[in-house]
Image (cartoon, rainbow, N blue to C red):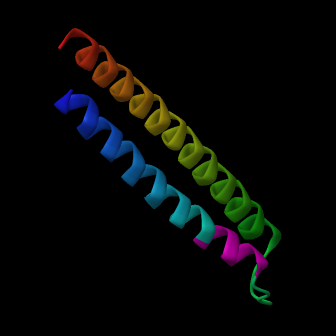
Amino acid sequence: MKVLNEKMIDCKRFGTVLLAVGIFFYLGVIIPVDAKNELAVNTMVLSSTSFIALSILFFIQYKQCQMKLLEMDDNQDLYN
C-alpha cells in the first residue's frame, strides 16, 4: 500500500509539472512577437500539446492508483 501511495503522489507531481510546462509553451505561442518564425511556433505548439497530453496521462494514472488504494482499503476493512 505504501508503494502505491508513493506512486500516486509521484504521478500527481509529474502531472502538475508537465501541465505547467505545457502552459508555458502555450503562452509562448499566443504572445505576439515579431521575431518568431513558423518553425518556432510549430515546435512550441507541438511541445505544448505533447506536455499537456503527458500530463493528462499522468493524472489518469494518478486516478487509477487512487481507485486501487481505495479498493485495497475497503477490502482490508472488510476482513477486519
Which residue is painted at 71% across and 69% down in the image? 40
Question: Is residue 12 rendered to the left or right of residue 9?
Answer: right
Task: Give how far across and how far down residue 28 sits, in percent.
Answer: 67, 77
Which residue is painted at 20% across and 30% down in the image? 3
Q: Nearer the viewer, residue 69 or 78?
A: 78
Q: Main secondary structure of the magenta part?
A: helix
Task: Give how far across and how far down residue 5 sits, in percent.
Answer: 26, 36
Question: Is residue 12 rendered to the left or right of residue 57?
Answer: left
Image height of 74 relative to 7, above or below: above
Task: Give how far across and how far down residue 64 sits, in percent.
Answer: 47, 29
Image height of 80 relative to 33, above or below: above
Find residue 32 and report its image quarter: bottom right
Which residue is painted at 63% across and 56% down in the image? 47
| Residue 26 is inside the magenta segment | yes
Question: Is residue 29 rendered to the left or right of residue 74?
Answer: right
Region of the chain picked out in magenta, as a range: 24-30
| Residue 38 is inside the magenta segment | no
Q: Quadrant of the C terminus?
A: top left
Task: Give how far across and how far down residue 63 sits, in percent.
Answer: 48, 36
Find residue 24 and report its image quarter: bottom right
Q: Nearer the viewer, residue 78 or 23?
A: 78
Question: Is residue 41 rendered to the left or right of residue 55?
Answer: right
Image height of 69 relative to 26, above or below: above
Q: Nearer the viewer, residue 9 or 24?
A: 9
Which residue is painted at 68% across and 76% down in the image? 27
Image height of 55 relative to 75, above or below: below
